[in-house]
Structures are given as C-alpha cells and as structure tokens.
Image (tube, grey):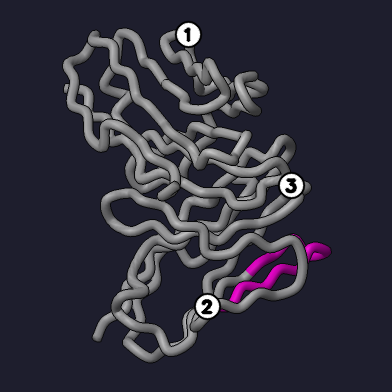
C-alpha cells in the first residue's frame, strides 16, 4: 500500500462542474502540498497546508490531520484546469512523498 | 530570480553513456532536492542537500548516480553507464528551511536508447 493514496486516478467532467480530488496518507507529516502538473512535466505548487483550509481563486484545499485526509476542490471548472493534480506530503527532513496523481479532463 | 532552472530540458543518450544534469535553485533557498518521475507515476525522492551537505539519499540512487552541490548553490546529477531503465523526468526543487516556498524546476527529460 502506498503511503499517499489519491482518488480518483482519472476524472472527466463537463465545464462548470464542481470537482473534488481526495488524498489519504498513512505517515506522520509536517505539511501537505497540492501540486499541478501539465503535459511537458512542469510542476506548480498550488497549496501547502498544515491545518484547516486554504482558498485561492476557484481552488480550495482542506486537510484533516486527525483523519489523515485532504481534499482539493475546483469550483466552476474550466478546460484550462485539465492537468494532473498530485498530493504530496512533507515528511522528515522536508522531502516530499507523492501520490500517483489524478488526471483531470474538463470538456467544454 | 525567475525560479528553479534545470538544464538541459531534454537529453537523448545511448545506453552506456554518462550524462550530467544541472539545477540552479532559487538563490535564497538553502535546500535542494532531486526527484525522478517515470511515465504515469508520481515523482520519487532521490536525494536532498542542505547548503552543500548531502543529507539524505534514496536507495533508488544506485552507485551509478552521484549528486553534488559544491558551493551550496547549483547542483549536478550525474548518471554513469546509463541504462534504458534510467529513462525518466528528473525534477529538481528547492525550498527554505522548513519547506516554505517549495518550488520545482521544469525538469530534464532523459531518454536512453
């Protein structure tokens, strides 16, 4: 079993839909990152969370430390949101342990 | 400072050749990380530097792999006697102490033929 599990692995939705991607982890962490990766490989950090909730534009990330679970929500989804979304936990001396990613496709 | 820079973006090499990649982190970041990502998988940790000291190495980093950060600024990752299984995206990231500002480079895509 991976230390960081994401669901779903693939998600296709229509433009405008509310999107939720889930992340569960089984190890102690100091923080959790949500990352976005577009074709071609570049990774962008969307959020770093250690508790509660953060919002940036149409993106919302929440974390429940007791339940070892985090969610990434996208409101009013748009085709440009299509990407791979990766959950990664910060462990030990600041190395990241990654989930396998969720491939999101938003159709117009 | 425009972020973490990696060079080259793409590298195609023949099996058995040596390759070297370079990473220039954000200048005020004292921590630098190397990760490897194979197709369809999330990145995996390879090694980590705090300033010039290499503090942790994954068991994924075989004897053919070596990383350096000689002056605590840029870092190099060398792979000797490349194998087809080394084909992957090699990602570099840097951060402040405490993990703030964790920033990734665009990666170097290695193809071993």
Which residue, given by chain and number where applicable, does mark 1 sit on? Answer: B63
Q: Is residue B89 visible?
A: no
- Disc 3 crowd, CA 10 A, few/some/many (<14, 14-19, 20+): few
- Label 1 to label 2, Cα distance in Å? 42 Å
- Label 1 to label 3, Cα distance in Å? 29 Å
Q: What percent of the width, then of the height, locates residue B70? A: 53, 15
Q: Chain of mark 3?
A: A
Pointers 2 and 3 in contact (CB under 8 A)? no
Q: Chain of mark 2?
A: A
Is residue B105 one of those drawn in magenta?
no
Residue at image position (29%, 17%) is B19
Which residue, given by chain and number where applicable, does mark 2 sit on? Answer: A59
- Label 2 to label 3, Cα distance in Å? 25 Å
Q: Chain of mark 1?
A: B
Q: What percent of the width, then of the height, locates residue B95? A: 60, 43
Which residue, given by chain and number where applicable, does mark 3 sit on? Answer: A27
Q: Is residue B78 above or below residue A49?
A: above
């Amino acid at each position: 079993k991976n230390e960081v599990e994401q669901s779903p692995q693939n998600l296709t939705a229509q433009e405008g839909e509310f999107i939720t991607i889930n992340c569960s982890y089984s190890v102690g962490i100091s923080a959790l990152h949500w990352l976005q990766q577009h074709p071609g490989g570049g990774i962008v950090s969307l959020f770093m969370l250690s508790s509660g909730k953060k919002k940036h534009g149409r993106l919302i990330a929440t974390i429940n430390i007791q339940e070892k679970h985090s969610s990434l929500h996208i409101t009013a989804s748009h085709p440009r949101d299509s990407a791979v979304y990766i959950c990664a936990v910060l462990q030990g001396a600041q190395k990241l342990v990654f989930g396998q990613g969720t491939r999101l496709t938003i159709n117009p | 400072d425009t972020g973490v820079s990696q060079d080259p973006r793409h590298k195609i090499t023949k099996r058995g050749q040596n390759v070297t990649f370079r990473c220039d982190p954000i200048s005020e970041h004292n921590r630098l990380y190397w990760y490897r990502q194979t197709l369809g998988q999330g990145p995996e940790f390879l090694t980590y530097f705090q300033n010039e000291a290499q503090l942790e190495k994954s068991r994924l980093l075989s004897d053919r792999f070596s990383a350096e950060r000689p002056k605590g600024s840029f870092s190099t990752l060398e792979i000797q006697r490349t194998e087809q299984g080394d084909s992957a995206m090699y990602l570099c990231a840097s951060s402040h102490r405490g993990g703030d500002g964790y920033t990734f480079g665009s990666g170097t895509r290695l193809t071993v033929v």
